[in-house]
Amino acid sequence: MCGIAGIIHRDGTSTPGDIGNEMTKMLQAMKHRGPDSSGFALYGPPDDMLVMRIKLADPNETRDYGWSDRLERHRNEIEARLAKLGAVIDAVRGDQEYSFRVRFRYTGELKPLADYVEDVPGCEVLSLGHSLEIVKDLSDAESVAERYRLAGFTGTHAIGHVRMATESDVDISGAHPYWAYPFSDIAVVHNGQLTNYHQWKRRLERIGHRFQSECDSEIIAVYLAQKMDDGLTLETAMKQSLDELDGVFTYLVVTGDELGVAKDEMAAKPLVLYESPELVALASEEVAIRAVIGHEIDTYDPYERQVLVWHR
Amino acid sequence: MKISYDARGLAEPHARAPETAVIEGEGAGRRAVFDAADLSTRQINLELRRLVYAEGITDVTIRNPGAKHSVAVGILARCRITIDGSLGYFGCGLIDGPEIRVTGRVGWSVAENMMSGVLLIEKNAGSLTAAALRGGDVVVRGDVGARTGIDQKGGTILVGGDAGLLTGFMMQRGRQIICGNVGSGLGDSMYDGAIYVGGKIASLGVDCVEAELTAADDEFLARKLRIYGMHPNVTFRKFVCGQKLWNYDNLEPAERKLVL
């Protein structure tokens, strides 16, 4: 089933929205759609520094006596590798033993950097960008938000996902949102199943992309980011995806300044949309939108093959 | 702050009617109003049932439904229910008898398997509106999503605005009146019944054909639209089953495909 949600504050650059709390409320209202894991892609104020969110291990993997020591070693190794490639580390924060966030100054290519970090055993780069931060973990949205201290996170736009695992394991690798590795500041959440996922995975792998999970949704992010890198706008890339991706899907995609939604030609997965002059909120269920908007609202469902994009 | 609301209403097997309704009037003219803002789905339905069945009140208003799912399901009595706000998914399903008015919007699968009565929705409705409708009138003044009246077996669906794809998919009996435009695959694989469309049609579905609009059709349309105060300035076209898929014999599936 899964539940997806998105929110964008149109004037978020001048007055940042309370997106950490808002996304937590939206996702928690849809907990019944997927209690396996919850994920957030949050966009803070744009900055010339880069932020990397890294997973060192999965929380539900078997832990031996050396587990904590090994993760500590891997974390130091990652910091050393970042420094070796010329990144100047500004701040490191570890919310959990098995994951941490590092903020650094770096001007080179992102792919060699991310590849070098992921070369550390068990490590996965969850997100990398100037304002994007992806936080995802097992259990419901409120527990994840508490664990990663998202309450004070302000910014311009965000998407989130509550997952009911159908196609792959219950672990962080299978949790959404997916970062469009190695393209900075692009992420996707998806409700549905793609049937030509293996074809697209092979096509994208042939041009050098890496996929961390067995989850079909991971390809959507890279697919769109690659098209944008080839010179298409987000909207055009999304329109092409309606014909090139098979299966059922409603997905949300975010870039540094845009939030987009696309619905497949069968309109098989629900989405409710609310638009106002200040913000746009959309979710699999209206209860999620009402969780963050106090007054009475009018909403509507986008139709099949509809692609919509909003700017902050 | 923990959100304890369970949108499915499953987690409260021992819930009781909150008995918070304000009842006004005397005898047969009694009216009840209650606020659903702080109630769970199950509490809302228990309170509604208490008022309709135990108290015998025939005019109930629910305020602040907050797009909760499965509200006012399975009411099997003649009564008038006003829902002052919007509903989530599976609202007003399986009802037999009531006249329900929703002042806001409804989500997917509203009035699923409704048997009789009237459901009037003032704004938009989601997909699968009036799925497997058996009888009564379902009126949506706004737009509806995809697969409206899928597997419809009777009754009438009226839509003031536009309808999405596969409207009337596999419908078996009954009527649909769509005043606006419809998406692709109109009446796909319909067995019987009639769909009247006032606007543009993206495409017809498999085995759906246009039929001549008779005097009886005009009279039916005028009567139904008048009841709900709808006056669309359009010329209706009628669509029915082409009967090409009527293979109620022992054709093999492979042979059946040939007629598609």
Image: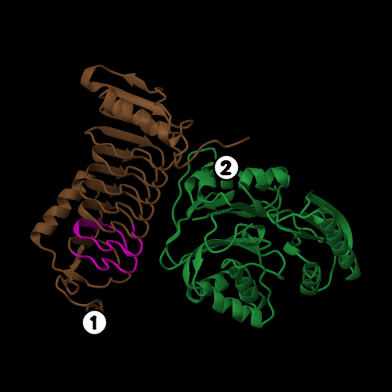
Chain colours: A green, B brown
Where is the N terminus of chain B found, in terms of image quarters?
Answer: top right
Q: Mark 1 = which residue?
A: B258
Magenta segment: B162-191
Q: Relative to the observer, which residue lies in front, B172 or A109?
A: B172
Find numbered disc 2 in the image and state the secondary structure of the residue it sits on.
loop
Q: Quadrant of residue A198?
A: bottom right
Q: Position of residue A274 (x, y in %)?
A: 50, 50
The answer to whether residue B179 is magenta is yes
Q: Relative to the observer, which residue lies in front, B41 or A121?
A: A121
Q: Does residue B63 appear in the picture of this structure?
A: no
Q: Relative to the observer, which residue lies in front, A136 or B214?
A: A136
Which amino acid type is shown beneath numbered disc 1?
Answer: Leu
Mark 2 or 1, closer to the camera: 1
| Circle number at residue A292 | 2
Q: How crowded is the residue under tag 1: few (<14 C-alpha within 10 Å), some, or many (20+)?
A: few
Dot 1 falls on which chain?
A: B
- Compared with B48, A61 (above or below) is below
The answer to whether residue A240 is magenta is no
Dominant secondary structure (helix, strand or loop) of the stretch shown in magenta = loop
Q: Give left or right: position of B44 versus A137.
A: left
Dot 2 falls on which chain?
A: A
Which amino acid type is shown beneath numbered disc 2?
Answer: Val
